[in-house]
Image: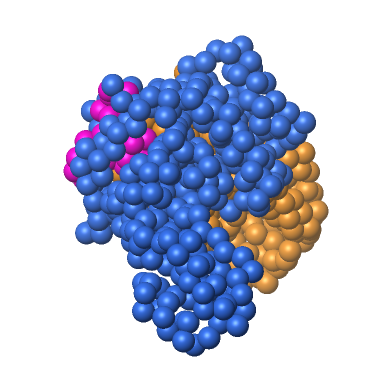
Amino acid sequence: MNFWEIGKRNLKEIYRNPVLLGFLLGMPVAFMLVFCAAAGGGQASPIAMSIVDEDLSQTSSAFRQNLGNIEAIEVNEPIYSEKSQAQEDLEDGRISLYLFIPSGFEEATRTQQAINLELAYKEADPMMGLQLKPIIEAVGFEFLGTAPPLNVELKGTESKIKNPAVNFYAPGIVVFGLMILISTAAEIIAGDREKGFLARMFTTPARPWDFILGYSLPFIPVLIISTFIYLGVGMALGLTVVGNLGHAFLIFFLIGLCAIGIGMIVGSLVKSESQAGVSWIFIVPIAMISGTMFTVERMPSAIRSVAGALPFIHAVDASRAVLNGSSFSAIVLDLYWLIGWAVVLFAIGILLFRRTMVS
Amino acid sequence: MNAVQAFKLTKAFDGLVAVKGIDLEINKGELFSLLGPNGAGKTTTIRMLCCLLKPTNGTASILGYDVVKTPFAVKKLIGVSPQDTILSERLNCWENLALIGKVHGLSSNEVRGRSEELLETMGLMERSKDQVRKFSGGMKRRLSIAMALVHDPKLLFLDEPTLGLDPQARRAIWEYIAALKGKKTILLTTHYMEEADLLSDRIGVIDEGRVVALGTSQELKTNLLEMHSMVVSTENLTAEVLEDLRNKYSRLEMAKERLRISHKDLDFKEIVDYLHSRGVTVYSAALEQPTLEDVFIEITGKKLRD
């Protein structure tokens, strides 16, 4: 049970260190406050609108084009072909509103029958629908000439997600927070090597596995408690948990293990506690390209491939998806990816850490 | 069986040979000092004996257990206070002692009992519940030594136990070490000759990775010092007298009115009588007690604290 004694000591060294805790807890919480507050303002113009085009005709396409030319509207890509998909995305908070062009649109324009379009929006935010209705009707009027009449029906949908911005940022920042464990673990290990504490402990009868467990297990309660705190703050800011919170925890736990593994690797390779600070050189860029704070959709495909090979983007995507209501089957692939990385990183971490014990 | 037995112990780092075939025998219950300047190989020797470094060549055993073949048997028997005071800075005294005690297999009760005893002896009880990062250098060093003792080891390694401490703190630690004498086998390294002189049963003088002299402090001083010195305070010395003395004795140093004469077989009376006969006033004359530093300079030709 020597590992228990070493682990207990390490846990105390962590929770009694205000600087380490400041980074680990303070920074993500501050980020969450800033990002969620920054995203909490009113919708900026132009209004992003999705379109469900069931008609998929030349006329409907031309009509969409005309809508896209209006400054006040930004038409989201891709165009939905099925209403159910758009409705699901609206409910899950991925889109704010959509315009439904029913099949028979071209036929109706040709035969000059009345046309009913449907503008679906979230009930929590009816203003956008009200703003857009006259604009769309005006475009329709111009596009079609005087007749036939084009009616835009407003249809409110109650979204389960109260604040889509918080649901976007919070899971990403939880993953970013857990990435800080890389530097926490690296600093503890490198510091104890630099100051000779490990060497002193090596003169005791503790065995190599006591050290490996004693220097990895204490980070697990830290990881669990940090996750609770990050999520707690997220919820206080309006994070809506639509899906299974347990699945989200599983994802956060796995990415936390990956971070501890990387921390052990860095801690074993660098020579001093201050050198362990180099971990920030890759924590921040990887956090950026993994979409913890910004959407990666507009990043070049090469960068997205790099991010996709690493575990973090999978944790970000999967946790966002489960929190927004996706089923377990939707995140299974991401989970495999995370488990694989956690195993590999831990194995390398143990190998390198063990190597430091032999001289 | 000796407490420590080393035979041709050698350690090379990337071509630099730090320890060059040291032979060492330390008896049970003895306080043995390795005395030498910085970089002489003292710490490297201790690190090999503590199973922290594998010897490049040679063998060493602690109470019969080989340090390379049976390191864990050795680690159960030893207590180590490393050169740099290494503590868990955010733990208090009790927690630091418990960590080492428990890793050595002591029960919670045993740890508590031993810690209480040691904290009292080392005068740390009052601050025992404070995180040790707030302690002074002397307090940290005392706790570090207590940590090496908590599991009641058979052999205690003290690597430069008073390095960098002020004279008061140093004296306090000397008292604790002196109190341990005879109860434990102790291997101490130091580059303070006063420390080695005061505490040791035997001293091994180490320089450039070799043990260059071995014996009790007295043995080293009497056997190894070929020259003896005397200091005379005088007045009205003439150039002629000085010339005479210079011809007769090996070394003559003159500072103000103080004359220092060094020679292999120095005859106190002969010198004083000669000075009187030449009409020189002698205020005082005394033979100089040799120090370990003199011994060291004699053997290695260099100052100890280089």
Q: Is residue A174 above or below residue B181?
A: below
Q: What chain is colored blue?
A: B
Res B188 quadrant in image: top left
Q: Residue at the spot x=51%, y=59% of the render? A: B287
Q: How is the image coloured?
A: by chain
Looking at the image, the residue that sits furthest to the front is: B277
Q: Residue at the spot x=24%, y=51% of the render? A: B20
Find residue A99 and report its horizontal and vertical position in percent: 64, 52
Find residue B300 and report its horizontal and vertical position in percent: 33, 61
Looking at the image, the residue that sits furthest to the bottom is: B239
> Is the N terminus of chain B in the top left, top right, bottom left or bottom right quadrant?
top left
Q: Nearer the viewer, residue A308 or B28?
A: B28
Is A292 positioned to the left or the right of A299 in the image?
A: right
Find residue B165 and report its horizontal and vertical position in percent: 62, 51
Q: Residue at the spot x=65%, y=51% of the render? A: B167
Find residue B44 and report its horizontal and vertical position in percent: 35, 47
The stretch drawn in magenta includes residue B186: no
> Is the C terminus of chain B in the top left, top right, bottom left or bottom right quadrant?
bottom left
Q: Is residue A160 visible?
A: no
Q: Nearer the viewer, residue B275 or B105?
A: B275
- Total count of labels: 0
The stretch drawn in magenta includes residue B47: yes
Q: Is residue B51 above or below residue B104?
A: below
Q: Nearer the viewer, residue B64 or A315?
A: B64
Q: Is residue B165 visible?
A: yes
Q: Residue at the spot x=60%, y=19% of the render? A: B114
Q: Is residue B69 above or below residue A348?
A: above
Q: What chain is colored orange?
A: A
Is A193 positioned to the left or the right of B65 in the image?
A: right
Query: Which stretch did the figure color magenta?
Result: B45-67
